[in-house]
Image: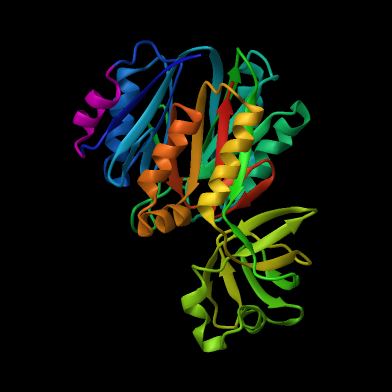
Amino acid sequence: MDYTIGKSDKMDPYEVLDEITEGFEKPILILYFTPVEIFKEFSEILSVKYPDSVCMGATTRIAITKSWVNESGSVAVAFESGISCSAGILKNINKYPIKYASEVKRALNEIDETENTICFELSTGLMGGEESVLSTLNSVLHKEKIKVVGGSAGNISGDTTYVSLNGRILDNSAVFVLIHNKYGAIHYFRENIYEPMNDNKIIATDVDLKKRIVREYNHRPAIDVYAEELGVPVENIEEQLDKHPVGRFVGNRMFITANKSITEDRGIQYHSRIYNNTRLSVLKPADYREVNEETFDKIKEEVPEPSFTILVHCLARTELFLNDGYMKEYSKKFGAELGSYIGFSGYGEQYSRYNFNMTAIIIVFE
């Protein structure tokens, strides 16, 4: 696999274009992530410069690559050989993206081979549509055993996020690309840096799926049960929301759901869906440095010589690492352990059929 990584700390779209694409030749696929302020214009001029390439990107909270982290930076990778790809768009993701399943079928028909192929998707953040996007993609790709993996767009501040495909600027949409690795498998890893506070399990007994609200746990107001699990008075739980997400259990797997806000009817609104009768635990931070080391060891054991890696890094994790002064150390350690990579930071992570938060997804190409 031949690829070139570009980065820039500039905020003028044309300067960013010059810096990022230095060394690009005839890319098959360009994946890119920029701040929201320059995203529209950069996306347009990138696609003009590379009209024969698939150009797909999203806004990000932070740009990450080997030994480099920049809160106003941009990063991109150009795949020059070793892959084939086909891309598409799903619109109206907060309502009926299933209407665009034909786009997924078209892309599938255009890809060379389904073995060693992934669907990498990027959704606009804070639209509440990620679960519907996953359902639409999997309705076509699951029977082909093509794994769906990706993330929601991000922003350093505010609720505006965008995605783009070939110069088209999109909100309330998802873009996706089927990537076939011609020279090996593609591996996926999911890293949680939170753990249950105790052995207790609470059950969601009254939910509003569309609004991502849990009104009751164990048939009682959600905030009362959450406060009891934390051992704090109800009036003090708002300051705990960012520190203590909840973990949804599917079999023996745990998926993190971030708290968003308290509702007027004593419920809690979340950043990903919680279904009725879901078993959950209230979580606390684990020793993330130790977890990182365990993750690197696991990846190196499974993929001793990675070719390239994509890091989908939750915005909440990013804020935690930045506040602790750990983000740059983490980026250097990541590169030292796994080699060349690019990463972005957004409002959610998606893997297979699941949408979740406060997690890292690591996509490793052989």
- Confirm whether residue 31 shows in the render: yes
Count of numbered marks: 0
Q: Residue at x 38, y 34 (%)?
A: 65
Judge whether 9 appears above or below 53 on screen. below
Q: Which image quarter holds the C terminus?
A: top right
Of residues 286 and 55, the one drawn nearer to the viewer in this rendering: 286
The percent position of residue 273, horizontal first and vertical second, equals 64, 59
- Secondary structure mostly seen in magenta is helix
Foreground residue among 352 and 343? 343
Report the residue at 53% width, 80% height from top: 237
Residue 83 appears in which quarter of the rendering? top right
Residue 81 versus residue 119 in the image, above or below? above
From the viewer's perspective, is 153 left or right of 15? right
Relative side of 345 to 7, left or right: right
Which residue is rendered at x = 36% and y = 45% of the image? 328
**Magenta span includes 358:** no
Q: Is residue 20 above or below residue 253?
A: above
**Any magenta on residue 12?**
yes
The magenta-colored residue range is 11-22
Q: Quadrant of residue 114?
A: top right
What percent of the width, then of the height, locates residue 162?
40, 44
Asked if one can make out residue 123 in the rendered structure from this viewpoint, the answer is: no
Is residue 125 found left or right of 49 in the rendered image? right
> Viewed as shown, does residue 105 lie left or right of 237?
right
Q: Whole-percent x and y of residue 214?
A: 65, 72
Point 46% across, 57% down: residue? 316
